[in-house]
Amino acid sequence: MDIVILAIIIAVVVIGAISGLVVSGRRKKRLPPTPPERTPSVTAPEAEPHVGDEAEKPRDEQRRTIEEVPLPDAETATSTPEAVEDPVVALPPQPEIEVPEPTAGRLVRLRARLSRSQNALGKGLLTLLSREHLDEDTWEEIEDTLLTADVGVAPTQELVERLRERVRVLGTRTTDELRTLLREELLTLVGADTDRTVHTEAAPDKPGIVMVVGVNGTGKTTTTGKLARVLVADGKSVVLGAADTFRAAAADQLQTWGERVGARTVRGPEGGDPASIAFDAVKEGIAEKADAVLIDTAGRLHTKTGLMDELGKVKRVVEKQAPVDEVLLVLDATTGQNGLVQARVFAEVVSITGIVLTKLDGTAKGGIVIAVQRELGVPVKLIGLGEGADDLAPFEPGAFVDALIGD
């Protein structure tokens, strides 16, 4: 037993000795040298300037005392101060009022523009009529020329029949004789004696009221603004009613036109009731004793029954205050026969009293003037011949026919 205990003690001593040798060996291993510590480079902050370092050098001259500073005299101190306009709250400058061109003879001044687009019709007819032998083929060509210009089937047949008869009776056909003959027949077809006045005869206590209707894209709002210029040029005061509440910026556009000639625009919220705005416009026109109130209605698609019915509502509401003197239908001359379809539907909803043909300078189909008058039984009263502010002209049959057949 003692031997076992002694053996255990010897084993423990041996193990302890071996462990000491291992630890000692580990301690004797050389460690990698520690890199020298870097001293951070610190840049000393610039010395802050002391009070007075940047001050100006004292002036040599002697400073005045408060007793030496002169005071304003009593009259200056008690005078009424002058108002100084604050640029922040100042009202925006008012637009300069323009003076529109006189309407008398305006179509004559624009005749060259009309001739460029319409002259082909007149020259074509004169060329055909000047042939030595006017056989059936030639008369068919004359018919085709008129139909291509959108004169319409019935008016074309009437014109050809009258030309046939007069040429047969005339016998010798010089160029001047043919031009005179053609001018007379075209004037008869257009209607030289038709009343084409835009009626705005105001009653003693009520203005003349004009409604402007038409489909989208015909230039209806622009035409309303230009019509305001026509009336102002004739010496009349105008109030504009922006009843087109469905097209974005239509009221802004109309108001801009009005401001240019000093006409006030009555408008409402976008998407508001057009009849209510038209009613307010007439009410304001009566209050201001204006000569005319022009109401720009929303563009209506002639295929939309609900919208067309609403147009009739606008007219009925307006007539609670004063009768509507004119209902002008704006048609795009470049649409040709399709414009007649629009015209028929509008005529069923509101009683059309006159037609405004726009973009007549952009088409060779001037015969639409004849066709639309025949279709509706109402005259073309105004025509648009360009983008300029004063390019809307009262329709003059003589100047129009002269532009067709040339000099």
Image: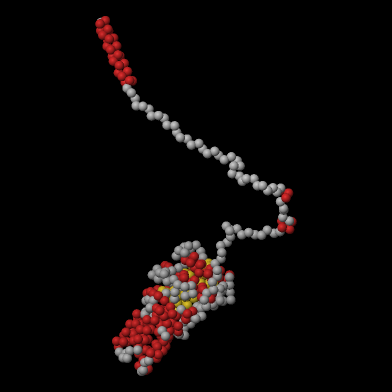
The N terminus: image quadrant? top left
Residue sitting at x 41%, y 84%: 406
Left or right of 285 on screen, residue 155: left
Residue found farthest to the front:
60
Q: Position of residue 260 (x, y in %)?
A: 53, 69
Q: Position of residue 32 (x, y in %)?
A: 34, 26
Q: Position of residue 104 (x, y in %)?
A: 51, 80
Seen in the picture, residue 137 relative to 58 is either above or below; the reply is: below
User: What colour-coding does the image apply?
Assistant: secondary structure
Please tell me which residue lies in front, 171 or 290.
171
Residue sitting at x 36%, y 82%: 146
Left or right of 50 on screen, residue 363: left
Q: Is residue 304 visible?
A: yes
Please tell me which residue lies in front, 308 or 64.
64
Left or right of 47 on screen, residue 342: left
Residue sitting at x 37%, y 92%: 173
Q: Is residue 321 visible?
A: no
The C terminus: image quadrant? bottom left
Residue found farthest to the top:
2
When asked about the image quadrant of residue 167, the answer is bottom left
Seen in the picture, residue 273 relative to 57 is either above or below; the reply is: below
Please tell me which residue lies in front, 306 or 104.
104
Residue sitting at x 50%, y 62%: 269
Q: Position of residue 281 (x, y in %)?
A: 53, 68
Please tell me which residue lies in front, 118 or 186.
118
